[in-house]
Image (spheres, rainbow, N blue to C red):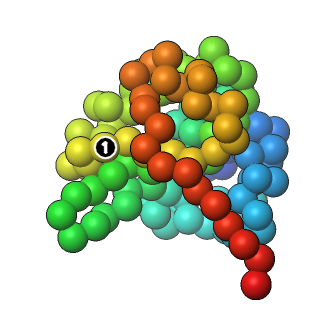
Amino acid sequence: MIFETVQEWAKCREGMLAALTRCEGTHTEDDVIEMLLKGHLRLLTEGRSGVVVEVLAYPRQKHLNCFLVGGNLAEVLEIEKRLPAIAAQYGCCKIVCSGRHGWTKVLTEHGWKVVTTYMQKEV
């Protein structure tokens, strides 16, 4: 499993590193790989692209969160087609993500809807 995870990461590493730059310093590449190896995150790949997902467990619902998304748009959209089945495997009732504003146009064309605006302020 470790070898396969590292191989899969290597295939989409370039896109994942680009996505990590948008995480505002919350995770390093080593953090993500460690979390993948411990089973806290799951990496889905297509070609040289990837989506890292995690299950967010709330008191009344579980959501499949697309934590990192990187690579070729067409390949990412192929992964997106698999997300409902994966969410169902984990007992999730929703698939969620946050990202650059440009994703709203792409994802709304695939059945997603914008439900909130995410903002931050440095302290």
Left or right: 25 as drawn, with respect to 105: right
- 58 on left or right of 45: left
Give the percent coordinates (x, y) of residue 108. 49, 23
Residue sitting at x 81%, y 39%: 14
Res 113 visible: yes
x, y percentage for residue 37? 54, 61
Q: Residue at x 43, y 32 (%)?
A: 113
Q: Amino acid at mark 1?
A: Lys
Tell me: residue 66, above or below residue 38.
above
Kindly identify which residue carries mark 1: 94
Q: Quadrant of the C terminus?
A: bottom right
Is residue 58 rendered to the left or right of residue 82? left
> Which of 43 and 107 lies nearest the eye of the viewer?
107
**Residue at horizontal 32%, vertical 31%?**
84
Instruction: Mark 1: give few (<14), some (14-19) or many (20+) Cα within 10 Å.
Output: some
Does the rendering let one see residue 8? no
* Residue pictured at 59% horizontal, 22% vertical: 106
